[in-house]
Image (spheres, rainbow, N blue to C red):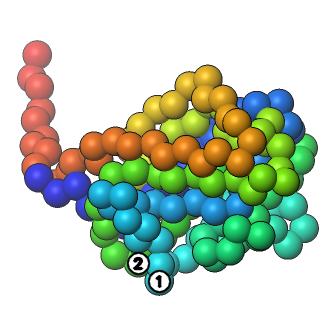
Amino acid sequence: MATTWQYWRVYITSDNGGGGIEIGEVQFRLNGVDITTGGSASASSSFFGDNGGRAFDKNQGTSWASDFSNVWPQWLKYDFGSPKKVTSVYWDMNGNWSTNRQPRNFQIQCSLNNTEWVDALVLTNIGWSLNVPQEFTFTPPSHGGRREYTIIG
Ligand SMILES: [Ca+2]
């Protein structure tokens, strides 16, 4: 069964009290290797020019920042342009930034059509230490082998 999905996102329902997300670099990885190249990024909101692409520009000194209005959810999405298998998300804050602006409760999700989303991993009560990246590993959900049944009662 296929485990490749074109769209991947981190869907964040709360941070650690900072009122918004600020993140230097995010990598969607296959077996530990960054594969976030050649696609396009987007995000639920941006603080001034700190758009979603800045989390994938391979520059630790630039960041995606959501607006600091303490409004949830916020999400960061990567469109690979074609289906990709992803087995982890690597999340690397810059040491100058606060741990309380990192996600606490969030889901890693994937989609075939950018509309319907499937959870690959659900994370709860995640804490952070300053300048310590975290990698969240999972088995990607499968599709394509699913059979549709009509239950007649
Ligand atoms: Ca960056």
**Which quadrant is the C terminus positioned in?**
top left
Mark closer to the observer (1, 2): 1
Q: Label 1, on which residue?
A: 38
Image coordinates of residue 128 in percent, x first then y, are 68, 35
Image coordinates of residue 11 in percent, x first then y, are 58, 45
Q: Amino acid at mark 2?
A: Gly
Q: Secondary structure at mark 2?
A: strand
| Camera-side residue of 79 and 16 | 16
Instruction: Left or right? Give the position of 84 relative to 58.
Output: left
Instruction: Left or right? Give the position of 102 relative to 116.
Output: right
Image coordinates of residue 134 in percent, x first then y, are 55, 44
Residue drawn at x 90%, y 67% is: 48
Can I make out residue 86 in this image?
no
Image coordinates of residue 19 in percent, x first then y, are 86, 38
Marks 1 and 2 close (CB-CB < 8 Å): yes
- On screen, 6 above or below 143? below
Q: Residue furthest bottom?
A: 38
- On screen, 136 above or below 90? above
Q: Is mark 1 within 8 Å of ligand 1?
A: no
Residue drawn at x 34%, y 42% is: 138
User: What is the C-alpha distance between the residues marked 1 and 2?
Assistant: 8 Å
Q: Which mark is residue 81?
A: 2
Q: Amino acid at mark 1?
A: Gly
Q: Earlier in the sequence, mark 1 or mark 2?
A: 1
